[in-house]
Image (cartoon, rainbow, N blue to C red):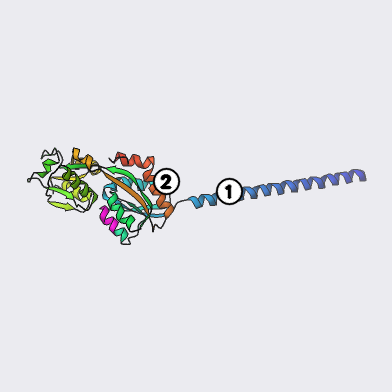
Amino acid sequence: MTRTARRNRRTLQVAGAGAAALLALSACSSSDSDSSSSTSDSSASASDKLSGTVTVFAAASLKESFTTLGKQFERAHPGTKVTFSFGGSDSLAASITGGAPADVFASASPKTMKIVTDAGDASGTPATFVRNQLEIATLPGNPDKVASLKDLTNPDLKVVLCDKEVPCGAAAQKALDASRLKLTPVSYEQDVKAALTKVELKEADAAVVYKTDVHAAGDKVGGVEFPESADAVNDYPITLLKDAQHTDTAKAFIALVRSAEGQKVLTEAGFLKP
């Protein structure tokens, strides 16, 4: 091989090595860029991920449907947990204003929600998410032949009502007043579930509760609708609380309650749309 030919060959080898180095550098740069982009996307995704425990104070009548929604929420957002405290809305409101730690309050009436908003413990404006109507719960098969609200005034019947300070009790009293009926119950119960339990245990012959509670009890009780209940329908408001610990997660739970999916669970339980 001539000297000129060897020189030309060496020049081509150097050029080829240079091109290879440029390609490697380009590939490395591209890989770094992709990795950076991937890391950025991953960080954005991580920052959007919900976490933490949400404590929900909710009216006793919401127990079954909210428990279902809580499980759905946890499945949809791994790493979250929803805990509930169910009871009479008035006692829950008093607990909140007294400093009990909670993130969300779902009340069975605007009146009990107002206790919380007036105390400045709500964040934002409460929104009505469902409504509920009263129904008479009787013993299975309705052996006492209860057919109307007036039938509950029979002194031979053992009837229980919710306490008048509780939304279901206030609604029952409103229906009785509208009908000009006077009813003396054997007991006033602290929340609607307690009133229903009296009938389920056959400690009472009837109770004025919500349609949703009769629905949830299944064959443990009978149900009798009465027209006066239309004059005492309760709105249910929900709100984020001022001292919520995991605000984004709490807001997301409220969003689920108000979503089409949440409304489906609630209406299937017997609640009325707002």
Residue occupying the point 81% across, 46% down: 15
Query: For the residue marked with disc 1, what is the amino acid?
Result: Ser
The N terminus - image quarter: top right
Characterize the magenta stretch by its predominant secondary structure: helix
Labels 1 and 2: the sequence-earlier one: 1
Q: Nearer the viewer, residue 188 or 31?
A: 188
* Residue 85, visible in the rendered structure: no
* Left-right relation of 103 to 90: right
The C terminus - image quarter: top left
Secondary structure type for disc 2: helix
Residue occupying the point 56% across, 48% down: 41
On the image, the x and y values in percent for residue 26 come to: 70, 47
The stretch in magenta equals: 88-94
On the image, the x and y values in percent for residue 209 come to: 21, 45
On the image, the x and y values in percent for residue 186 come to: 12, 51
Q: Which mark is residue 76?
A: 2
Say whether residue 93 is magenta. Answer: yes
The Cα–Cα distance between marks 1 and 2, rounded to whole angstroms, is 24 Å
Q: Nearer the viewer, residue 85 or 19?
A: 85
Q: Which mark is residue 55?
A: none
Residue occupying the point 85% across, 46% down: 11
Q: Is residue 120 above or below residue 184?
A: below
* Residue 266, visible in the rendered structure: yes
Q: Which mark is residue 38?
A: 1
Q: Nearer the viewer, residue 131 or 145?
A: 131
Residue occupying the point 39% across, 42% down: 259
Query: For the residue marked with disc 2, what is the amino acid?
Result: Ala
Say whether residue 193 is magenta. Answer: no
